């Protein structure tokens, strides 16, 4: 099964959303860390 399906099923779409949220949180943490560092 390909990771990026043209028309993903419900479970795959949810997994992609979780992965996107995790990536967004990681980026936010990195930005906060770069601002907080002297």
Image: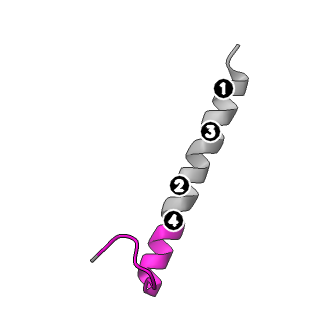
| Span colored in magenta | 2-18
Q: Residue at point 51% right, 65% down? A: 18
Q: Residue at point 44% right, 83% down? A: 8
Q: Residue at point 44% right, 81% down? A: 6
Tag shown at residue 22: 2
Q: Earlier in the sequence, mark 2 or mark 3?
A: 2
Q: CA distance from mark 2 to mark 3?
A: 11 Å
Q: Earlier in the sequence, mark 4 or mark 1?
A: 4
| Residue at image mark 1 | 34
Tag shown at residue 18: 4
Query: Decide: marks 2, 4 in contact (CB < 8 A)?
Result: yes
Q: Is residue 10 in the magenta section?
A: yes
Q: CA distance from mark 4 to mark 1?
A: 24 Å
Q: CA distance from mark 3 to mark 4?
A: 17 Å
- How far from the left and from the top, in percent, is residue 34? 66, 26
Tag 3: Cα neighbours inside 10 Å, few (<14), some, or many (≥20)? few
Q: Earlier in the sequence, mark 3 or mark 1?
A: 3
């Amino acid at each position: 099964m390909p990771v990026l399906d043209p028309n993903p099923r419900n479970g795959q779409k949810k997994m992609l959303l979780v992965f996107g949220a995790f990536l967004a949180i990681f980026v936010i943490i990195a930005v906060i860390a770069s601002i907080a560092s002297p």
